[in-house]
Every structure is written in C-alpha cells, then in structure tokens.
Image (cartoon, rainbow, N blue to C red):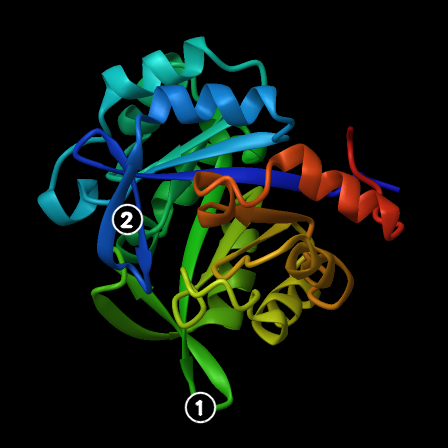
Amino acid sequence: MVAKRIIACLDVDDGKVVKGVQFQNLQAMGDPVELATRYGQEGADEITFLDISATIEGRKTLIETVERTAKNLFIPLTVGGGVKTVDDARRLLRAGADKVSINTAAVENRNIITAIAREYGAQCVVIAIDAKSNGPDWTVVTHAGRKDTGMNVIEWARTVERLGAGEILLTSIDSDGKRQGYDLKLTRRVADATHIPVVASGGAGSSDDAFKAFTEGHADAALVASLFHTGQETPNSMKAALRAKGIEVRL
C-alpha cells in the first residue's frame, strides 16, 4: 500500500505566508523559509509553496524566496504562481523546486502542460484546480479565485491527465479556510475520474478531516495550512492520529 502524504501549504503574498477564508481577508502567518523548515522538521512529507499574487500582478514567482526555502528542506517542494512557460518552470526547478504547480496558465494555454511534462517528466507537473460549487457540479476558477471559467472540474481533471499532468492539487474554494472539512464529494469525484494522485485541499480542521479525505474522498494526499500555522496540529501529530486509525503514513 502506498503511504498517504501530509503536505504543508505555504500561501505566499509579498514574501510572507498568509492565510484567509475562501481566498479573502488574508492574514500574515510568518516567514516562508522559517515555516517550511519547521514543517519539514515536524514530519511533513512535502511542502507546497504558492505565490498567490503572482498571476494577479502579472509577474514571476519570487525565485529568491524559493531558493532560500529549498536550501532548508530535505523533502519535496512544489512551487506555483505565475508559471506560464517552460522557461518559468525551468527557473523554479533550478531554484530548488521538485515540482511546479500551474493553474491559470494551464487553462489559458493547455499546451504548457504537455510541454513541461515532455521536458521534465509528468512527475514534475502539478495542475492546481480551484473548484467552486455550481449546483450538482463544480466549475474551475482561476486568477486566485477571481475568475469563474464555467469549465466543468471533472472534465478538466480528465483533460489535464491526458495532457501529461502527474498530479492534481484540488482546492475547494467553498471550504477553504473554514476548517470544517474537505469537500469529500468533490475530492472523490475527481479521484475516481482520474488515474493520477489527487491532493485534497481546502478546509482541514482536524486530523479526522484528513482521515475522511483518504477514506471517503479517495485522496492520495491532504494539504494543510491553518492547522499547522496556528500550532493546533503538527504534521507528526496528524500522522500519528492517522496511523492509529489504520492509515498508512510515513512517521
């Protein structure tokens, strides 16, 4: 059995880690280098670094911050925000990232998924899908939650897999920051519709929420932000609770 992963998320705005609710009312949480280092020491399987204002501001991800973060880590680092070309991906990978996360640019230019996968391998390509409930289904939202594309999330997930993505980072905008649990129906629908790993994101309020993401949502990994930033949980405490419930994790 493949071990489930606990991933610590760092949403970065203007060089600081921030957290909000449904992508709004952002509050500063700390320095990305310090937090990434701490979470790595506390047992996180991976770190995801998302420069959430890069696309909105039309700029590249903060390479220097990525370099400083990567130097302090001994676990995989995924970086996203402002990635639009193979050259953008190359700069991030050379700066120390192990994977690049793409959201808006993939919607606007699907060829970028295949181009990066061919250059560096599918394992380096994470497609971030921000999903918003739309009746019985969900639509894809881009530009840090500001633009509803009207695209069906399940169909988009199948498409990015076909184009060469190696992983999907699936965030429920409706659940984000509320700490009331992941959107299990959404997560399960995407996980069951694809054959690549799906990371559940948006709404973690306890280790039990991660347990449900794995058992009911069929996720391969759970992304956690607020719980770690506030010290309510650590990656190791969450993984210990999961193992006690029979989930295979790395301790």
Visible in this render: residue 143?
no
The quarter of the image holding the N terminus is top right
Going by the numbered disc 2, the residue's amino acid type is: Ala
Going by the numbered disc 1, the residue's amino acid type is: Gly
155 or 33, which lies in front?
33
219 or 234, which lies in front?
234
147 or 64, which lies in front?
64
Residue 15's place in the image compared with 224, above or below, is above
Residue corresponding to mark 2:
105
Which mark is in front, 1 or 2?
1
Residue corresponding to mark 1:
135
Q: Residues within 10 Å of mark 1 (few under 14, many from 20)?
A: few
- Residue at the (62%, 75%) spot, across then down: 185
In the rendered structure, the answer to whether residue 40 lies left or right of residue 5 reads left
Q: Position of residue 66 (x, y in %)?
A: 33, 20
In the rendered structure, the answer to whether residue 58 lies left or right of residue 41 reads left
**Residue lying at the far left of the rendered structure:** 57
Mark closer to the chain start, 1 or 2: 2
- Residue at the (63%, 36%) spot, across then down: 235
- Residue at the (62%, 56%) spot, across then down: 206
Q: Position of residue 173 (x, y in %)?
A: 39, 67
Q: Position of residue 86 (x, y in %)?
A: 32, 29
The quarter of the image holding the C terminus is top right
**Residue lying at the far bottom of the rendered structure:** 135
**Residue lying at the far top of the rendered structure:** 71
The answer for how far apart the CA atoms under marks 1 and 2 are is 26 Å
In the rendered structure, the answer to whether residue 18 lies left or right of residue 227 reads left
Q: Secondary structure at mark 1?
A: loop
